[in-house]
Amino acid sequence: MLRSQLQQNEVSATQINNILKPDDKQDVKLAYDLLSQIWALPSLNSEDASARPGFMETWEVLHTLGKVFMNILLPYTCVELSLSKQLTLLSMAAHMLLVMAHEDKAGTKLMPSQLYINIMIMIKNAYFCIAKAKVNDPIGKFFLIFLGTDHLEDIFGIL
């Protein structure tokens, strides 16, 4: 289904094959490319929605999920964003996930509960760290990318 959605968005077959390649589960660049293709899906238009309802329902779900991906990833990957805009995007992601997780009691159908908790803690941590940094140095600069959320991953990366 995802392949057909991406083809509809005029992504080349070669690129689709590359981003859907499950060989390396730890390939961050590949995962980012896939998520960015999903968030690049355009909004529905009315004539397409009536033509193929099942396809368009999936399109709408992927489009909404893509917004969540974008709101989580852009604050950490787009260096041009202001700190205020980064926090706004993270807040939108948190609110969207909260609504999606509680919509019709979706719970773990949306994502494993540990992933949901980790994302929410990551967002809370960003807000708390920025607040602490602003108290310590009100005119100082703060960059979200320097926040580390898992020291075990840091140690693994060093090793």
Image: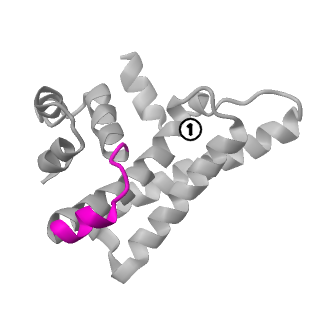
Q: Is residue 157 visible?
A: yes
Task: Look at the image and tell me in which quarter the N terminus lies.
Answer: bottom left
- What residue is pinned by disc 1? 75
Residue sitting at x 31%, y 26%? 29
The residue segment tinted magenta is 40-52
Q: Is residue 55 above or below residue 76?
A: below
Q: Residue 12, located in which quarter of the rendered image? A: top left
> Nearest the camera: 105 or 44?
44
Across and down, in percent, residue 144 comes to: 62, 34
**Residue drawn at x 47%, y 40% as measured from the top left:** 73
Q: Secondary structure at mark 1?
A: helix
Residue for point 15% across, 37% down: 20
Residue 17 located left or right of residue 80 = left
Instruction: In the rendered view, tell whether residue 148 sits above or below residue 120.
Output: above
Return the residue found at the far bottom: 104
Q: Is residue 139 above or below residue 5?
A: above
Query: Residue 59 at what x, y percent from top left?
Result: 26, 59
